Image: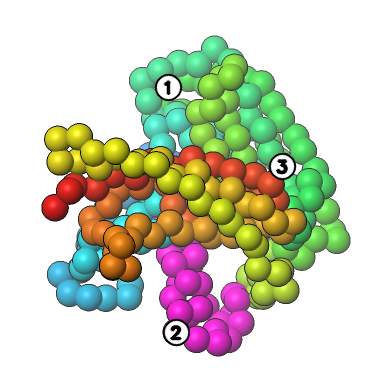
Amino acid sequence: ISERFGQASSAEEFTQWAQWINYDGYRAMFESSQTNRQGLLIWMSHPCWPSMVWQTYDYYFDPTAAYFGTKKACEPVHIQLNPLTDKIQLVNISREDFLSVKAEMQILDMYGKVVMTDSALLPLSSDTTVDVLDVSVPDNLDVYYLRLKLSEGERILSENMYVRGVEDSSLKALRELPAAKVVVKTKFSKEDGLWRGIAEIRNDSQVPALMIRLNLKGKDGEQILPAMYSDNFFHLMPGESTLVSVSFKDE
């Protein structure tokens, strides 16, 4: 953690950075398994005691960043980076054949400005992993964001984003970013003992909001667990917004 982000100033900051490494590590494990299609098994999805490491959800049923990194990597139709070859890959482990999909790539600088784009149209057969685009990063970028999108017409099939540095240690530069202003609006309803809600998250600042974590709490300030989120630990560029669904049982 200290090599990648620098020395943490508090236990809270240390755990936030640890979640980031969890997300990237678990996503990388499952994305790499798509190359040879030999499968991947994690021997322990969660520990039976409170622990800081090696869990997709913790002792208290709180889903960690590793859970969402795994969920992202295991999409049936997925777009990903192969960091060993610097190529963008399309993965289709579904039974559906696509006559024409569009793969899009953006490279953004540390402040969220788009500096390079590329795209390709191609068919995508079932049970395939194919290279589609080459990643070529401008020399003047030490830290950059790689944003990927795969779509069929107006339907988005997969979105993915990597925060990368020329060297791992160069991610320390992210600490120079001002704090982002993130606004959250929620709406919940209850039916048959199950609460369902939608959270709208918007980045109202001029800088990226990185590794946003939604954390549902009751009026007493305590976490509501277990709670299911459609997504978490995600990034929003300046002015962007997204919707996340949340559900939990009444008891």
Tags 3 and 1 touching, CB below 8 Å = no
Q: Residue furthest top?
A: 99
Q: Position of residue 167 (x, y in %)?
A: 68, 69
Image quarter of residue 12: bottom left
Please identify the quarter of the rendering in which residue 8 is found. bottom right
Instruction: Residue under label 2, please give it.
Output: 11
Magenta run includes residue 24: yes
Q: CA distance from mark 1 to mark 2?
A: 45 Å
The residue at which mark 1 appears reads as: 126
> What's the mark number on residue 106?
3
- In this picture, residue 173 sits left or right of residue 82: right
Q: Please name which of the two marks, 1 or 2, marks the residue nearer to the observer.
A: 2
Q: Is residue 120 left or right of residue 226?
A: right
Q: Quadrant of residue 160?
A: top right
Q: Which mark is residue 105?
A: none
Q: Given this view, does label 3 or label 1 mark the residue nearer the observer?
A: 3
Which amino acid is tagged 3?
A: Gln
Q: Give the image location of residue 90, x and y in percent.
A: 54, 33
Whether residue 116 can be seen here: yes
Mark 1 or mark 2: whose residue is earlier in sequence: 2
Instruction: Name the residue located 37 percent from the left edge and 25 percent from the top edge.
Output: 94
For the residues labelled 3 and 2, say whether their Cβ atoms are less than 8 Å apart.
Answer: no
Q: CA distance from mark 3 to mark 2?
A: 34 Å
Return the residue found at the far front.
Answer: 219
Q: Counting residues from the N terminus, which is met first, the one under dot 3 or under dot 1? A: 3
Mark 2 is surrounded, within 10 Å at the Cα level, by few (under 14), some (14 to 19) or many (20 or more) other residues, namely few
Between label 3 and label 2, give the one nearer the viewer: 2
Highlighted range, magenta: 1-30
Q: Earlier in the sequence, mark 3 or mark 2?
A: 2
